[in-house]
Image (spheres, rainbow, N blue to C red):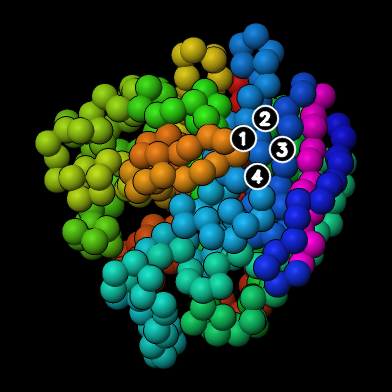
């Protein structure tokens, strides 16, 4: 296990950005930035031992300073969507940025993926920390943030979130890495085979806001309980797929509440790469990269529609406005602690 760090350029505000790279005993290599706590590279061997970088991203800070698709992003204070960009907490109504039509998406401005973090590195992990001040993005409470990326010798990329607020607030961080097991420049991901341990998904309005109803996946194109290609049913004549332009849905995971369990597996036949997803949260957004138009990525690659797939572990979107959903409220002085693992087998 080894850790190196190198310069990754300078932000437009003049901050020097460092890239931290961890390599495990099997040759897996993960790189991350103190700008945005972004996962910038994830190099994984194929069946022949050849390393390939399997996450979409940019070669320079300027790319990440725009990053409209959230490549590699750490998302907070609240990942995914909040309907009407507002919520009520303890009798107070909080108005958020309307950055997705009339709704709020992925927290607001400044995005957690576009600020600098303090970094504390060991031979196998990097912890990024900062304080998100009271009312940043419209959320109450000074939020102490720590997100730790650990690469293990068991070929796991482990993400630990630890947060604490001095006021009651809401907290629903996630990671928005786009994976392509053929390589970040490997083309569409519709040929990837996917399993999701979920019997239902959250029904949404036409602007992708959950309405409180959970739909049984049985007999629908949303059913991944038996492994199948992502693209097999993606163009099916089915309302939720039409609305989202493909998969962009929160799955209601079939798991023990609060337990860290395997909830998904994705594999790709030509490279032999397989990745498992573990979480202790109740939901996971499957996003098939439907809204990538044309992004100039790493090494001259051009990313377009469905060239990456995201597995965003989370509380259900809009849960703060739906009492029946597991609450994302973080009470003052209590610690939010959650773990997501991407494991290569």
Query: Looking at the image, can residue 126 be seen?
Result: no
Q: Which residue is mark 3?
A: 30
Name of the residue lying farthest toward the top: 48
Q: CA distance from mark 4 to mark 2?
A: 15 Å
- Decide whether residue 22 is among the magenta residues: yes
Q: Is residue 12 left or right of residue 240?
A: right
Q: Where residue 131 appears, x then y in whole percent?
A: 70, 75
Residue 219, located in which quarter of the rendered image?
top left
Any mark on residue 59, and which?
A: 4
Mark 3 or mark 2: name the one nearer the start of the chain: 3
Which dot marks residue 299? 1
269 shown above or below 225: above
Percent across and percent down for residue 325 are: 35, 62
Where disc 2 sits, the SS reads strand
Separation of residues labelled 3 and 2 (CA atoms): 6 Å
The residue carrying mark 2 is 43
Q: CA distance from mark 3 to mark 1?
A: 17 Å
Q: Which residues are magenta?
A: 15-25
Quarter holding the N terminus? top right
Neighbour tally class for label 1: few under 14, some 14-19, many 20 plus, Cα within 10 Å: few
Toward the viewer: 275 or 108?
108
Q: Real-space Cα distance between discs 4 and 3? A: 15 Å
Dots 3 and 1: beta carbons under 8 Å?
A: no
Residue at 84% over, 47% down: 6
Residue 64 visible in the shown view: yes
Tell me if label 4 and label 1 are in contact, CB under 8 Å: yes
Question: Viewer-proximal residue, 128 or 322?
Answer: 128
In space, the residues marked 1 and 2 are separated at their CA atoms by 14 Å
- Residue furthest to the bottom: 92
Closer to the eye: label 3 or 1: 1
């Amino acid at each position: 296990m080894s850790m190196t760090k190198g310069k990754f350029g300078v932000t437009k505000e003049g901050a020097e950005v460092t890239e931290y790279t961890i390599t495990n005993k099997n040759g897996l290599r993960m790189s991350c930035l103190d700008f945005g706590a972004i996962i910038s590279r994830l190099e994984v061997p194929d069946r022949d031992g050849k390393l390939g970088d399997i996450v979409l991203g940019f070669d320079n800070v300027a790319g990440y300073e725009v990053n409209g698709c959230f490549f590699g992003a750490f998302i907070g204070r609240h990942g995914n969507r909040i309907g009407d960009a507002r919520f009520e907490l303890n009798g107070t109504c909080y108005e958020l940025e309307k950055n997705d039509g009339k709704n709020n998406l992925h927290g607001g401005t400044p995005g957690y993926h576009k600020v600098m973090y303090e970094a504390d590195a060991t031979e196998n992990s990097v912890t990024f920390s900062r304080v998100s001040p009271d009312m940043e993005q419209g959320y109450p409470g000074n939020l102490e943030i720590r997100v730790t990326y650990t690469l293990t010798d068991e070929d796991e990329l482990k993400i630990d979130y630890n947060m604490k607020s001095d006021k009651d607030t809401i907290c629903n961080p996630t990671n928005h890495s786009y994976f392509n097991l053929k390589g970040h420049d490997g083309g569409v991901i519709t040929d990837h085979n996917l399993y999701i341990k979920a019997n239902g998904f959250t029904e949404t309005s036409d602007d992708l806001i959950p309405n409180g109803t959970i739909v049984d996946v049985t007999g629908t194109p949303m059913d991944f309980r038996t492994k199948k290609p992502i693209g097999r049913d993606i163009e099916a004549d089915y309302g939720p797929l039409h609305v989202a332009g493909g998969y962009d849905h929160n799955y209601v995971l079939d798991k023990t509440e609060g337990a860290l369990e395997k909830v998904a597996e994705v594999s790709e036949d030509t490279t032999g790469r397989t990745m498992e997803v573990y979480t202790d949260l109740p939901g996971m957004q499957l996003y098939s990269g439907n809204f990538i138009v044309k992004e100039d990525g790493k090494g001259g690659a051009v990313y377009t529609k469905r060239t990456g797939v995201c597995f965003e572990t989370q509380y259900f979107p809009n849960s703060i406005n739906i009492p029946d959903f597991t609450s994302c409220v973080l009470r003052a002085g209590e610690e939010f602690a959650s773990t997501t693992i991407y494991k290569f087998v």
